[in-house]
Image (cartoon, rainbow, N blue to C red):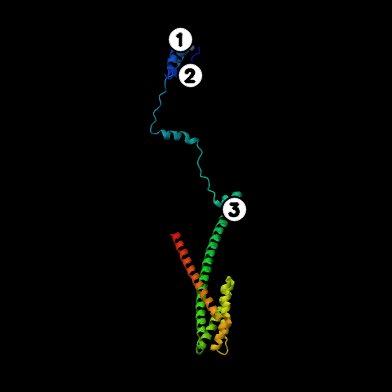
Amino acid sequence: MRHLTEEELIAHYYGEPESPAAVSKHLLECQECAQSYAALDRDLTEIKPIPVPLRDAAYSEQVWQSIRGSLPIYSPRPKKSFRGWLTLNPWALAAATACLLIAAAFFAGRQWEHRNATTAANLTNSEGAKERVVLVVLGDHLDRSERLLVELKHADPSIEAPLQAEARDLLSANRLYRESVKQTGDPTMAAALDHLERVLVEVANEPAGLSQARLDELQKEMNTDGLLFQVRVLRSRVRENAQGDAERKQTTSAVTKGVSI
Ligand SMILES: [Zn+2]
């Protein structure tokens, strides 16, 4: 038979046993445990609870007065400046320098990217604008050349002087356009302008003036009818390109506006 432990007896005294019926039954049946419990009961009954003293309003002051003598006097620590901190910590100085360098490199990189993006955008815009200007000017030049060739075809030899002056005027412009077109790699346009230049040279530099016979000769030799047709085709192509460019420009700006809003 298992006897009751001291913990079980104490719990029974305070009325908090895990199984009160079993403990009570055992105490009735077991002489030894009953004696132990009787002794415990006497001891615990003798212990009188100590009354908790009431604290008055001056309690906190009393506590403070009782401990203040044993506390060290507080003196604020001198503040270290950032410069002093860096001087005292070589590693901190190195870390701060590294941070500054990284920040500077990052900032410089951002600036460089931004500037490059802006420059590239400007370049694209300016190149596009330049191309449009070239197309418009070239279109005008082809218009004038077309009129000259038409007038040449139906020329009245009595009004040759204005034709020659116009041919000289067109000639200098044509040289510039021909060079420019050669650089942009447009062989059809370059060939047409080359042909036009030869005709203009002949018309401008005709020392004896433009007689009907000379005009007929020019038309045959230089194939001015063929040139006129070519100039008309190229002029319409240039106009289409210029219009397409303008439309693309409008679309782009519309898209940009849409994004920015
Ligand atoms: Zn027992």
Does the closest atom of ligand 1 sit within 8 Å of the Cβ of label 1?
yes
Q: Amino acid at mark 1?
A: Glu
- Local packing at callout 1 (Cα closer than 10 Å; few below 14, some 14-19, many 20+) is few
Q: Which residue is mark 3?
A: 98
Report how far apart the C-alphas of labels 3 and 2 lie in the structure.
68 Å
Q: How far across and down, in percent of the image, does residue 96 sit? A: 58, 52
Position of residue 82 relative to residue 44, above or below, is below
Earlier in the chain: of badge 3 and badge 2, it is 2
> Which residue shows up at 42% across the image and 15% down it?
21
Disc 2 is placed on an element classified as helix
Which of the numbered marks, if any, corresponds to residue 29? 1
Horizontal relation, residue 186 to residue 37: left or right: right
- Local packing at callout 3 (Cα closer than 10 Å; few below 14, some 14-19, many 20+) is few
Q: Mark 1 or mark 3, which is nearer to you?
A: 1
Earlier in the chain: of badge 1 and badge 3, it is 1
Q: Nearer the viewer, residue 32 or 260?
A: 260
Does the closest atom of ligand 1 sit within 8 Å of the Cβ of label 3?
no
Q: Amino acid at mark 3?
A: Ala
Asked if disc 1 and disc 3 are in contact, CB closer than 8 Å, the reply is: no
For the C terminus, the quadrant is bottom left
Q: Which residue is mark 2?
A: 7
Report how far apart the C-alphas of labels 1 and 2 lie in the structure.
19 Å
> Which residue shows up at 48% across the image and 68% down it?
244
Residue 180 in view here: no
Residue 222 in view here: yes
Does the closest atom of ligand 1 sit within 8 Å of the Cβ of label 2?
no
Q: Amino acid at mark 2?
A: Glu
Report how far apart the C-alphas of labels 1 and 3 lie in the structure.
86 Å
